[in-house]
Image: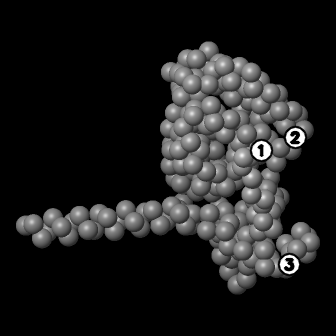
Amino acid sequence: MRRLQPQPTLVDQVYEAILLDISAGKFGHDARLIQEELAESLGVSRQPVQQALLLLRNHGILRDAPGRGLMVAPLEAEFVRNLYEVRAVLDGLASSKAAERGSDAAREEGPAFITRGREAVASRSIAKMIAADMDFHFFLYGLSQNPLIAETSLPHWSYLRRVMGEVLLHGETPGEIWDQHEAILNAVISADANEAERVARLHISHAATTLTERLPTNPQPEPVAASASRRTGKRVELRHKKAAALKV
């Protein structure tokens, strides 16, 4: 029996529309987002907008604004650097395993992703470029035949899309990005796992360096997930210290 794909809810659609505008630079740093204005522009009620905005705040895309509403949160260099370090490992692993397990599929299906990516660049649409970029990387995740790679990376992709928008708007040229993607694909097609991992990690590291050099180094509010992770780490460390003290 064919598996049914869940349809996006209205909240999902509003979330995507707002995130797309933020990633494409339509809302600048510290831009204030007002529920009533967004609801009117999207042609929906305030409730799905409110829920979508709360999700975006929880994912670190927005933060509370003084007085009223929410505002676009600035990107923080240290968090972006940490996030891309993790992404480099995951994408390197995905590319390596794709070369080992999916070189034939890469040869047959991969060139179409490169073509769509270059067409997106030609269109000058940030939204299309981000979508094509995501499609390419999730294609590699699928070729790896390790579903945990996509599952592990998925929670970070909302924030990554925001970062990718910054890279496309202010970093390296989009054409260079697809030159790098094509190099990854060629290594996968050649079934060269080591080379595929090397160029994939280099691609991610280069994007991180290009962006973080342009970001402020002063600490900014971090995404809720990252903040919660840090607090959990501190609690674990405190428990270890207490246990050690009891032993003494």
Image quadrant in which you'd find residue 208? top right
Per the image, the residue denoted by label 1 is 131
Q: Is residue 171 left or right of residue 247?
A: right
Q: In the rendered structure, find residue 124 and report the number of the disc placed on it.
A: 2
Q: Is residue 73 left or right of residue 121?
A: left
Q: Which of pointers 2 and 1 indicates the residue nearer the eye? A: 1
Q: Is residue 191 visible?
A: yes
Question: Where residue 197 sits in the image (x, y, percent)?
Answer: 54, 27
Q: Are marks 3 and 2 in contact (CB under 8 Å)?
A: no
User: Relative to the observer, which residue lies in front, 209 or 217?
Assistant: 209
Image quadrant in which you'd find residue 137? top right
User: Relative to the observer, which residue lies in front, 224 or 70?
Assistant: 224
Q: Quadrant of the C terminus?
A: bottom left
Looking at marks 1 and 3 on the same chain, the residue that comes earlier in the sequence is marked by: 3
Per the image, the residue denoted by label 3 is 45
Q: How many marks?
A: 3
Secondary element type, mark 2:
loop
Q: Residue at x 52, y 52 (%)?
A: 78
Looking at marks 3 and 2 on the same chain, the residue that comes earlier in the sequence is marked by: 3
Residue lying at the far front in this picture: please name it: 1
Which amino acid does the dot numbered 3 rest on? Ser
Image quadrant in which you'd find residue 53? bottom right
Distance between the alpha carbons at the discs numbered 2 and 1: 13 Å
Question: Where residue 201 sits in the image (x, y, percent)?
Answer: 55, 32
Q: Residue at x 29, y 63 (%)?
A: 237
Residue lying at the far top in this picture: please name it: 190
Which amino acid does the dot numbered 2 rest on? Arg
User: Relative to the observer, which residue lies in front, 165 or 55?
Assistant: 55
Distance between the alpha carbons at the discs numbered 1 and 3: 27 Å
